[in-house]
Amino acid sequence: MINLIVLAISAIMFALLVVWWRWPAFRAWIEAPKYSMLHQERRFVNRNATDAVAGSTRFMANKDY
């Protein structure tokens, strides 16, 4: 029984690997969530960097030297 499960999962993984290798459109569809997450992270980091710069200049403008 276990051998059958291992064989079935191995066959499914091999089939997915072959499809991923042969069809670039499938590869793009499979990897789309990764690129979406990277895009969201880049937007988040850029916004934090802009807020940090704006916050430090506001702080410097209000400081009495």
Image (cartoon, helix red, strand yellow):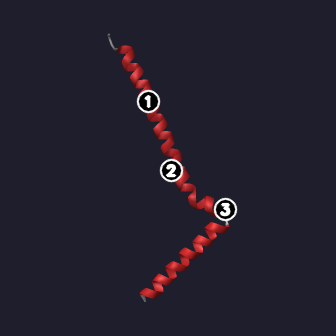
- The mark that comes first in sequence, 3 or 1, is 3
**Mark 3 crowdedness (10 Å alpha carbons): few <14, some 14-19, many ≥20:** few
First-in-chain label (2 vs 3): 3
Residue kind at label 1, given as amino acid type: Asp
Quadrant showing the C terminus: top left
Residue assigned mark 3: 24
In this picture, residue 27 sits left or right of residue 56: right
The kind of residue on which mark 3 rests is: Pro
* Residue for point 66% across, 62% down: 24
Neighbourhood count class around disc 2 (C-alpha, 10 Å): few under 14, some 14–19, many 20 upward: few
Residue 14's place in the image compared with 4, above or below, is above
For residue 27, above or below residue 48: below
Point out the frontmost of discs 2 and 3.
Answer: 3
Q: Which residue is mark 2?
A: 37
Q: CA distance from mark 2 to mark 1?
A: 21 Å
Residue named by callout 1:
51
Amino acid residing under circle 2: Met
Q: Quadrant of residue 17?
A: bottom right
